Structures are given as C-alpha cells and as structure tokens.
Image (tube, grey):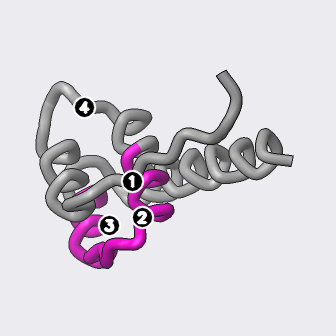
Amino acid sequence: MKGKICCELICCTDTLLQEINSTKCKRDDVAHTYYMAILSAENVDWKTVNSAIINRWSRSALKYIKNKANKLWDNTLISVE
C-alpha cells in the first residue's frame, strides 16, 4: 500500500496530563504523546503540561522528554525525504 497515513492527537493537554498522572506510563510513553501534541493543530497548554512533568519526575525528565520528542521529529523528517 502506498501513500501517507495521517493521524492527529486531539485533547492534547488532557491526554498528556492523563499519561503524566498514570503510574502505568513512563517518560518514553509521554515523549511519544508530547511529539504528537507538537504536530497537532490544537492549542496545548504547555506550561501546565511541563509543570506536571516536573512535578511527577524532575526538570531533567522534562529535558529528556523534549529531547526524545525532537528525535522523533528528526526521524520523521528523514523518513519523508
């Protein structure tokens, strides 16, 4: 099958906050959702999301999640070319 598949995360802020507050979700899980939220056309309350990440884990965890999301972005750009 050829062609592109497109999906968009909705309720980004709520989805991220649910994952952050879930003991089942790890930093890598949140990083993938964070990446999807970056791509979404929906407004995200980044201040609330980032504060929740810091409150659950730490500032270094926020940096880790952002870096992982950026790597996912970089990989997407490479695979599209």
Residue that label 3 marks: 50
Residue that label 1 marks: 8
Q: CA distance from mark 2 to mark 3?
A: 17 Å
Q: Residue 68: horizontal and vertical position, in percent? A: 57, 45
In front of the other: 79 or 30: 79
Quick one: label 1, few (<14), some, or many (20+) residues within 10 Å? few
Q: Residue 51: horizontal and vertical position, in percent? A: 25, 68
Quick one: label 4, few (<14), some, or many (20+) residues within 10 Å? few
- Label whose residue precedes the other's in the sequence (4 or 3): 4
- Label whose residue precedes the other's in the sequence (1 or 4): 1
Q: Residue 66: horizontal and vertical position, in percent? A: 52, 57
* Residue located at (31% from left, 78% from top): 43
Disc assigned to residue 40 = 2
* Residue located at (22% from left, 73% from top): 48
Q: Which stretch did the figure color magenta?
A: 33-54
Q: Is residue 53 above or below residue 24?
A: below
Left or right placement of residue 66 versus residue 47 in this view = right
Disc assigned to residue 17 = none
Q: Amino acid at mark 2?
A: Ser
Q: Verify CB contact (< 8 Å) between mark 1 and mark 2.
A: yes
Disc 2 versus disc 3: nearer the observer: 2
